[in-house]
Amino acid sequence: MQETYNGVRPPDSGQPIQYSNGSYTVPDYPIIPFIEGDGSGRDIWKNARAVMDAAVEQAYGGKRRVEWFEILAGEKAYRLHNDWLPQDSVQACIDYRVSIKGPLTTPVGGGIRSLNVTLRQTMDLYQCVRPVRHYAGVPSPMNKPDEVDVVIFRENTEDIYAGIEFKEGSADVAKLRDFVNTELLGNTKKRLRDDAGIGLKPISVHGSKRLVRAALQYAVDGGRKVVTIVHKGNIQKFTEGAFREWGYEVATQEFRDKIVTERESWILGALEKDANATPESIAAIVEPGISFAPASFGEKIVAEVKAVLAAIGSTHGNGAWKNKILVNDRICDAMFQDLLLKPAEYDVLATTNLNGDYLSDAAAAQVGGLGIAPGVNIGDGFAVFEATHGTAPRLADQDVVNPGSVILCGVLLFEHLGWHEAAKLIENAMEQTIQQKFVTVDFAKGMPGATTAKTSEFAARIAENMKAAA
């Protein structure tokens, strides 16, 4: 531990959170670094913090308390230290393990490309976890927003967000283009154009498996019923398609007693309906067009049926598979449609970086928008909770923005620490406040009869509802 970070001493009354053998040891007065955030973050953070502090006091009567420690990033850091993300701030997140941040701007006209991405890559925060559910009363463009209750696990370090790209017209892009065109595509008709910028999309065994493993473990621990691997493997077979295959490997090799794949459920279900069904007849159910395919394809499917029955027929058959976690996969564009039209069929999504980015925003739009969507970036022994929305600088210091995203980040943070009582107090009181139609302007516009509250008033009402419920 350092004595100071950016010249500021950590709170003397708190202790750092420890991590060993895959679990945290949380003191009663943990030091938790926070980044206020840029723009509207100034209004959001101070009010969200007041709600979190009230919940901890209400739940534990002074026996527990968060010792908040401000660290600098974004505009405040640049003004004070001429650095958008001081190394001391990153080190504090590492040393104290669990931190929380408001929205940060991305510097315009050069510099690092994203403060958020930098934190994720520096600390290897490979899971971006975004739970999305509808709170009763929140206005939504959907007919049945209450059917949305999904947790998205987005791989956080690879894919296009690895940031490996080369500018059109540069010497580097010419070197890469010539190598690819000559060495890799020389015997094909494919060519990289002379006027193209080029980006690389790495997706690894290591990165894919640890992400899907985390999603599956979350489903096991939380009693979730379905884990869906989302990909674009029909087009990008060696990146997105490989992510799918590696995900199934983790599921069937490491969680065998707890899961059943969708194809396995078809096979076991067919045998359940007809105990005399042959592998050939079951294969025709699994692949309805099998009679039109080459004989070798049919033989492959029959062999798959036999292998499934031999491997898990005794453990998963006779209906036992219905009590297992269902693991399936969906192509990302079809998943987008399903998330809009039949969200009740989905539970936990495990996906590559870009797919997870737009799917989490689309899910949030169905339940009230990013203003009420929390998120957390998790690594092995590290977690950074963050608002998922932008900085909205035009609304800064006006006491009008919705603090819901950061307040709900507080819920996730307390659950992560094992402080479930405080987490539940916040969530229940926030939902009650919304049902009272005492909401910020973004919700009030779509809520007939609502009282438009300031940011501070909305937060204060949540705290009042926590006390009233005691």
Image: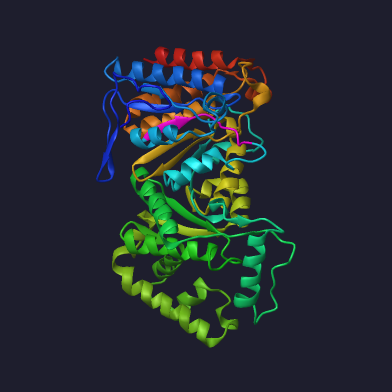
For residue 310, above or below residue 95: below
Task: Name the side, left or right, on which 166 lies relative to 152.
Answer: right
- The span shown in magenta is 98-107
Quadrant for residue 317, please give it: bottom left
Quadrant for residue 442, please give it: top right
* Residue at 39% from the left image edge and 54% from the top image edge: 210
**Where residue 327 appears, x then y in whole percent?**
44, 58
Residue 55 among those drawn in magenta: no
Residue 405 seen in this snapshot: yes
Which residue extends farthest bottom? 295
Task: Name the side, left or right, on which 28 lies relative to 58.
Answer: left
Which residue extends farthest right? 195
* Residue at 72% from the left image edge and 59% from the top image edge: 169
Residue 101 among those drawn in magenta: yes
**Where residue 288 appears, x then y in whole percent?**
56, 74
Q: Quadrant of the C terminus?
A: top left
Secondary structure mostly taken by the magenta-highlighted segment of the chain: loop
Residue 128 seen in this snapshot: no
Task: Name the side, left or right, on which 133 lies relative to 272.
Answer: right
Q: Nearer the viewer, residue 193 or 336?
A: 193
